[in-house]
Image (tube, rainbow, N blue to C red):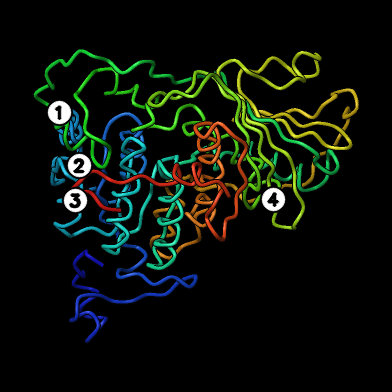
Amino acid sequence: MAGRPTRRQFLKGGAAAAAGFVILKRNGLAHGYPANDALKIGVIGVSGQGGYDLHNVAHEDIVALCDVDANLLGGAAKEFPKAAQFRDFRKMVEAGGLDAAVVATPDHVHAPAAALALRAGLHVYCEKPLCHEVFEVRALTNLAREKKRVTQMGTQIHAVANYRRVVELVQAGAIGDVTEVHVWVGNDYCGGERPTDTPPVPANLDWDLWLGPAPARPYNSKYVPFWWRGWWDFGTGSLGDMACHYMDLPFWALGLSHATAVESEGPPPHQESTPAWMVVHYMMKRKDGTSVPLTWYHGGKRPRHFADKLLPEWGNGTLFVGKKGMLISDYDKHVLLPEKDFAGFTPPAPTIAPSIGHHKEWTEACKGNGTPLCRFDYSGPLTEAVLLGCVAFRAGKKIGWDPEKMSTGDKAADALLKREYRAGWVL
């Protein structure tokens, strides 16, 4: 590990400590520090969601802060004055002294930042979607496994009690065999046409670093600080932003493995801008070998069940349709339907233990205590499925998916699985 050994490590570890580390093994993981020591964490992206992550890992030792915006970096530094400050995450990782890194940048920088941290031997917490491209997801998943690092994707809702109770209901057969799943959110991100004006770059922003591996283009406030999500060069639209939260629930409850076929509906594909609405039809393979259709909706599109007055008017949700009934869930609530059919129903006894907190699952596992539920081995396949919806939409056709060959079976669609990085940037 990059962190220095403590005096206690040196005295107890003998020759190993003299070499720079002590190996402790818990739950099959090896780490270069005692489980009761605070992790030395560097945070890449310190405002917005990054600020949320920063404060949720502040029970450990925040030793480095990184942000391309000097104003945001300075604000975080006032709260963590002992932390070193960086504008470029590459320099932060190269500086050493870290045990772990949190990546909370825009989507297009997730993979290069997380990959660099993993190669440096750091544990990694990365925001959703795990990556911008399907190829990046697989590369990052494999790298985490190869380096044997502890990982977690930022799907914080996975830790709430409501999701756990829904998983238990589905797996206990409360609604019988599940025959279809529907997932919808009301929001949308659509960039529109590329702006033609070229305002000056704010003095506090390093625009070249913000672009990272994406193709060069002039600065515009239509990209930074928030609306980058609506542009294919930087974001993945509403599907990439929200599906890792909402599709997480059926992925978990049904033991989904991967998509086998994907077809997307929406407005005519725009070369640069993500769509204002989309409906994605997935055929999902389960780990038991069976398959189940899953449909995603955003931008005002919703399942047919609303028109049939079968569902409560929830703006976002996940619907499981089973042979004995239906189960609808949002982040913090769920209902068995039709309600009259489940009057007096006794839910199964809880079998999934309460979470100690999504971030703390990760930090404790870095010390050898437990295993994060959204580690890349789980969240990688979830993110691959999500991003294949973007690939199908941009390709304008139904695609298949062979996870072993990493191919859609279509040359044009396969070209959308990976893009070339701008000079100076590597995965």
Q: Position of residue 28 (x, y in %)?
A: 48, 73
Q: Helix or strand or loop: what does disc 1 sit on? A: loop
As drawn, which residue projects farthest toward the bottom?
15
Image position of 307 with respect to 97: above or below: above
As drawn, which residue projects farthest toward the left?
203
Give the CA distance from mark 4 to mark 1.
Answer: 44 Å
Give the CA distance from mark 2 to mark 1.
Answer: 13 Å
Circle on res. 205: 1
Residue type (three-letter) at the residue carrying disc 4: Lys
Q: Which comes before the other along the chain, label 3 or label 4?
A: 3
Q: Helix or strand or loop: what does disc 2 sit on? A: strand
**Which residue position holds label 2?**
66
Q: Which comes before the other along the chain, label 2 or label 1?
A: 2
**Which residue position holds label 4?**
285
Residue type (three-letter) at the residue carrying disc 2: Cys
Judge depth for marks 3 and 4 and give the one in front. 4
Q: Position of residue 307 (x, y in %)?
A: 76, 13
Left or right: 143 in relation to 58: right
Rendered residue at 66%/38% (across/down): 282
Rendered residue at 62%/37% (across/down): 398
Give the CA distance from mark 1 to mark 3.
Answer: 17 Å
Left or right: 350 in relation to 116: right
Residue type (three-letter) at the residue carrying disc 1: Leu
Give the CA distance from mark 2 to mark 4.
Answer: 39 Å
Q: Which comes before the other along the chain, label 4 or label 1?
A: 1
> Which quadrant is the N terminus positioned in?
bottom left
